[in-house]
Image (tube, rainbow, N blue to C red):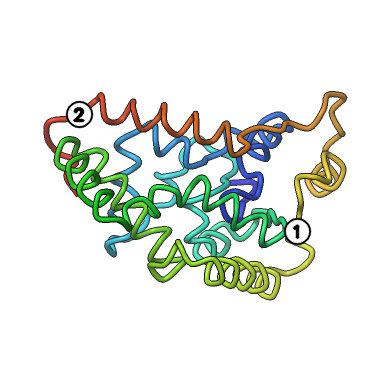
Amino acid sequence: MKLIGVGFGRTGTFSVKAALERLGHGPCYHMKEVLEDPARIQQWLAIARGDPANWPEIFDGYASTMDWPAVAYWRELTAYYADAKVLLTVRDAERWQQSAEATIFRYAGRVATPTGRLVDRALRWWNPEFDAFSTMVEQTVHQRDFGGDVVTKAHLIDVFERHNVEVMATIPAERLLVYDVAQGWGPLCAFLEVPVPEEDFPRVNDSAAFQENSRARMKGILLRRPATGLRS
């Protein structure tokens, strides 16, 4: 493991994943990998429930990691991979909250309504993989990082800001890069000690693209409808 990303989702983590892979620090582990592999869902669900984490097994074949679910265990990972560099992706807190509300926490807002709860129960009954993934996200992200509240604006901003402060207070400055993707290649390449590519920095997964991709991935999970072995 060369690099551990410790910034919350919706801080450009998918763009950085693409950038890291372009710079020779890939493959980069991301929530995308979990969505596409039911076995990975079960790995993180087991950790959330208290089973010991086998980090070498989980990250086998990966040179870096960004985004949740790994970010929820940033303390453990930065201690275990003591030689890895650490990347804290940041952005304006209010803009982050607006983006998170419109994307990664959008479903949680829907489930807070009576109709949404009924739909959620039906989807979980219909598809054990969806049930397992939703439970993993709730326990790993919603509960572990946000204390169960991912809909209150002030709370989200407070958790986001406190997380960033804690990372900066915990990780030695020489090991850490605090990075806004708007800065482009320069600071990231200098931190990794690699040449700056000639092409533009990747800009992917804005809110509109996230919603489209998320719908496609959720549809893929629901259509798979595994019969056994994945019920949360």
Q: Secondary structure at mark 2?
A: loop
What residue is rendered at 27% in x and 40% in y?
130
The image shows residue 108, relative to residue 19, as above or below, that is below
Type of amino acid at the residue the image marks with label 2: Arg
- Where residue 26 appears, as percent x and y from the top left, is 62, 34
Quick check: can you spot residue 86? no
The answer to whether 232 appears left or right of 97 in the picture is left
Type of amino acid at the residue the image marks with label 1: Val
**Residue bearing the label numbered 2:** 225
Does label 2 or label 1 sit earlier along the sequence?
A: 1
The image shows residue 42, relative to residue 46, as above or below, that is above
The CA distance from mark 2 to mark 1 is 41 Å
Residue 178 marker: 1
Mark 2 or mark 1, whichever is nearer to me: 2
What residue is rendered at 46% in x and 39% in y?
60
The image shows residue 210, relative to residue 169, as above or below, that is above
